[in-house]
Image (cartoon, rainbow, N blue to C red):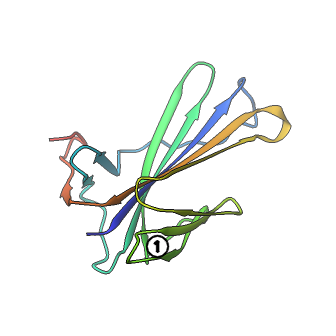
Amino acid sequence: MPLFLEITITTVMEQSSELSPEFVVGTSAYIYNQDDQILMLAPTIELNAYSQVLVGVIDVLETPSQSFEKKSILQFPGSPLAEVAVLDVDAETGVVSLQYAGETYALAPNETQSAKQPLPGDRGTQIITIIHHGQLKDMQPLSEDGSWR
């Protein structure tokens, strides 16, 4: 079973702005049950048999009046997003080295790393939290309605 990391990127907008980022909300790509270490994936996600690391990316946009969330899955090796790059995986220790927004992180299982930075023009704040959940115990398909079974 692959290792599983989650990266939550929370953009907190202080006020409504014409410069607010575009945000498209879709169906949930995954649900992770931390107690059982089970990852449930949308049926549309095809995993590579050789994936060593799965990265769940949660994009959150908080405005003064609403909050939006979308989830996606990355695979290493596989199809990375431009924002996140898995650089290396130590198979013995489970340490994953990755790069996000110009910063390099090395996380062992059960470690968490957070960073906070202001948005340009005092429009708000972006908070990045990376959690290394360790090795998955199981993966299952997500139900058609996107709920936990």
Q: Quadrant of the N terminus?
A: bottom left
Q: Determine whether 94 is above or below 144 in the image.
A: below
Residue at (54%, 65%) from the top-left corner?
A: 81
- Label 1 sits on residue: 79
Residue at (22%, 39%) from the top-left corner?
A: 147
Picture coordinates of residue 122, whole percent (x, y) = 82, 33
Position of 120 compared to 36: left or right? right
Q: Quadrant of the C terminus?
A: top left
- Given the image, on which type of amino acid does mark 1 rest? Ser
* Camera-side residue of 19 and 132: 132
Can you tell which quarter of the image residue 116 is in? Answer: top right
Decide: few, some or many residues near mark 1? Use Cα within 10 Å; few <14, some 14-19, many ≥20.
Answer: few
Q: Residue furthest front?
A: 93
State the SS at label 1: loop
Q: Determine whether 72 is above or below 12 in the image.
A: below
Q: Residue furthest left?
A: 149
Picture coordinates of residue 92, whole percent (x, y) = 38, 77
* Camera-side residue of 84 and 144: 84
Picture coordinates of residue 11, whole percent (x, y) = 63, 38
- Total of numbered circles in the picture? 1
